[in-house]
Image: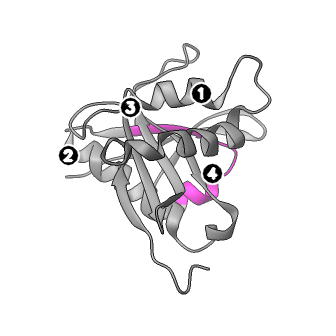
């Protein structure tokens, strides 16, 4: 699929008709086993990303009018542990687009947004630290044997 198609990056607020599809991608990847979570509630959260000059921000990759990837830049939304802000959150790439650089480009777009907003660092939590290390993140703290807090230091 990807060899014959190219994706374009947008802010979700530019394509609000895709909000439900993007919310479903995020919900299915991270929240499907959480009681009281739903794509509808995720879509409501995504609706708060209304501009490109304030948090939250939602970046989407689109192919043929459909979202194939998403990454968010948010203020910290988990009270424990509170270590800094903003956070890279909800990176999802649909399976048929994985391993082709799309996730890396979404992360770079979010980091570029953070720089543009004057941020000097971006935190994230992951069970795949090697992916983010390739992009320049450092391990900040290991919370569990399979989960790391990580930090991007942003240069200008």
Residue placed farthest to the bottom in the image?
4
Of residue 12 and residue 144, the one placed in the foreground of this image is 12
Q: Decide: marks 1, 3 in contact (CB < 8 A)? A: no
> Residue 63: where, in percent of width, then height?
48, 67
Is any atom of residue 150 visible in this view? yes
Q: Which residue is mark 1?
A: 40
Q: Quadrant of residue 23?
A: top right
Q: What range of the chain is rendered magenta?
A: 122-133
> Residue 97: where, in percent of width, then height?
61, 69
Query: Mark 4, residues whose alpha carbon is within 10 Å: few (<14), some, or many (≥20)?
Result: some
Colour scheme of this structure image? one colour
Q: Which tag is nearer the camera, tag 2 or tag 1?
A: 1
Q: Which tag is nearer the camera, tag 1 or tag 4?
A: 1
The Cα atoms of the two marked residues, 4 and 3, are separated by 18 Å
- Image position of 55 with respect to 112: above or below: above
Mark 2 or mark 4: name the one nearer the start of the chain: 2
Q: Quadrant of residue 98?
A: bottom right
- Magenta span includes 102: no
The Cα atoms of the two marked residues, 2 and 1, are separated by 30 Å
Q: Which residue is mark 3?
A: 86
Q: Secondary structure at mark 4?
A: helix
Residue at the spot 34% in from the left edge and 39% down from the top edge: 121
- Image position of 44 with respect to 94: above or below: above
Q: Secondary structure at mark 2?
A: helix
Mark 1 or mark 3: name the one nearer the start of the chain: 1
- Magenta span includes 123: yes
Q: Which residue is mark 2?
A: 116
Find residue 129 and name its label: 4
């Amino acid at each position: 699929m990807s060899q014959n198609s190219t994706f374009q990056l947008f802010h979700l607020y530019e394509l609000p008709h895709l909000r439900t599809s993007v919310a479903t991608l995020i919900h299915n990847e991270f929240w499907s086993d959480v009681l009281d979570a739903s794509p509808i509630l995720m879509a409501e959260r995504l609706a708060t990303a209304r501009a490109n000059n304030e948090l939250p921000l939602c970046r989407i990759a689109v192919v043929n009018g459909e979202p194939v990837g998403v990454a968010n830049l948010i203020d910290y939304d988990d009270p424990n542990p509170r270590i800094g802000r903003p956070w890279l959150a909800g990176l999802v790439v649909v399976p048929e687009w994985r391993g082709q650089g799309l996730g890396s480009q979404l992360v770079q777009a979010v980091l570029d947004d953070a720089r543009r907003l004057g941020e000097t660092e971006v935190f994230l939590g992951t069970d795949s630290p090697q992916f983010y290390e390739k992009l320049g993140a450092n391990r900040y703290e290991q919370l569990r044997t399979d989960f790391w807090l990580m930090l991007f230091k942003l240069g200008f």
